[in-house]
Image (spheres, rainbow, N blue to C red):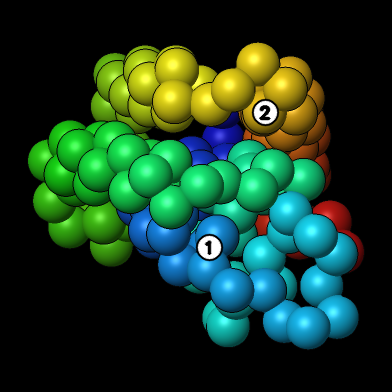
Amino acid sequence: MSWIKMAVAGIALCAGASVASAQGTPPANAPQGQAGPREGGRGRGMQMLFEGITLTEAQQKQVQEVSEKYRGQMRELMPNGFQGGPPDDATRAKMDALRTKQNADIRAILTADQQTIFDKNVADAKKRREQMGNRPPGGRGR
């Protein structure tokens, strides 16, 4: 797994943990069940996991609590963020394990219909991370 892939995944997890704001009031022209784009791309990773899902207020609160729990654990793994360079393999494995646990905890909050969409979104996110890891060095893939 490339350090760029982990950096993006870690940033998405840490910065995107505020699901309540990602699930906030969508713009008037946004399709039902999707929040509008966030400024600066912050939280886009988490927002993409909920694309096509409308959470109730209670679900939003529960998801936010789960996200905050794991965000704290992720910060413990990378106290200086990615300023110290890419994480080592052991740290990457721990980050992946945390992401898997977080997704399982979030999935448990959702209804069966929401879980189906969430599962597809998680699989799509995993595919994107894998594709990012296969980019040539120095390339941004744009």
The answer to whether residue 3 is above or below residue 11 is above
Q: What is the C-alpha distance between the residues marked 1 and 2?
A: 16 Å
Of the pair 138 and 80, the residue shown nearer to us: 80
Image coordinates for residue 88, horizontal then vertical, percent: 32, 30
Q: Which mark is residue 114?
A: 2
Q: Is residue 24 visible?
A: yes
The answer to whether residue 94 is above or below residue 3 is above
Mark 2 element type: helix
Q: Residue at x 38, y 21 (%)?
A: 105
* Drawn side of residue 19 relative to residue 55, left or right: left
Which image quarter is the N terminus in? top right
Label 1 is placed on what type of residue?
Ala
- Nearer mark to the viewer, of 1 and 2: 2
Which residue is under mark 1? 22
Q: Residue at x 63, y 41 (%)?
A: 49
Mark 1 element type: helix
Question: Residue 101, located in which quarter of the rendered image?
Answer: top left
How many labels, in total? Answer: 2
Q: Residue at x 78, y 83 (%)?
A: 28
